[in-house]
Amino acid sequence: MKIGYARVSTEDQNMNLQIDALRAAGCAHIFTDFGVSGKGFDRPGLTEALDAVSAGSSLVVWRLDRLGRSLPKLIELVDNLGQRGAEFQSLTEHIDTSSSGGRLVFHIIGALAEFERSLISERTKAGMAAARARGQHVGRRPALTPGDVADARRAVAQGRSTMEIAGDLGVSQRTLRRYLNIIPS
């Protein structure tokens, strides 16, 4: 028996393509996670799908990244399926662990995906270092300008409440307190 699993990470996405492909592949049951990141593996739909998989059955996904983004966790999950006498199949990458060639392809694709993520991370870090060396700010823009902070300090000294000042500046009280280094009482 084939058990399907589909996931989209944002509510703007549509999983019809995945579900249609899983049905065409012969999945008897399809479990889904809607609006859930693939970073973690603790997802209700995935848990149900894994519970439904038994010896002699297969967990089928449309694409490997729908199952998860962590290579070690993916390998652990597929190995766990194998220990339970179940197989894994990814339709887009043509991975089917019911054969030794399929297991090899799974590990090669996983290794390449991890390599690509490492390269992206290295390029990002190098770009950030270069920007810092040029004196550019890296990261989120400050919520308040130095002028805003100076105005807020004057307003606090005049007796205005931080709630009122924060509202005027369009930030939370917590953000304002952090900029003013005020510990809430």
Image (cartoon, rainbow, N blue to C red):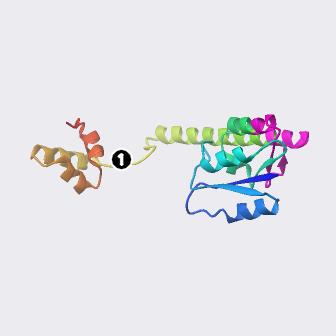
Helix, strand, or loop for circle 1? loop
State the residue at coordinates (29%, 44%).
174
Residue 69 drawn at (x, y percent) = 66, 44
State the residue at coordinates (90%, 39%).
100
As drawn, which residue projects farthest toward the left?
158
Q: Is 88 left, or right, of 169 in this rendering?
A: right
The residue singled out by tag 1 in the image is: 142
Q: Nearer the viewer, residue 47 or 153?
A: 47
Q: Nearer the viewer, residue 62 or 42?
A: 42
Q: Is 48 left, or right, of 91 in this rendering?
A: left
State the residue at coordinates (36%, 47%).
142
Position of the C terminus, as image quadrant, is top left
The reply to whether the magenta stretch includes residue 25 is no
Q: Nearer the viewer, residue 109 or 146?
A: 109
Q: Is 42 left, or right, of 93 in this rendering?
A: left
The image shows a total of numbered marks equal to: 1
Asked where in the image residue 71 lies, by quadrant, the reply is: top right
Q: Residues within 10 Å of mark 1 (few under 14, many from 20)?
A: few
The residue segment tinted magenta is 78-107
The reply to whether the magenta stretch includes residue 85 is yes
User: Which amino acid type corresponds to the residue marked 1 in the rendered image?
Assistant: Pro
Residue 152 drawn at (x, y percent) = 19, 47
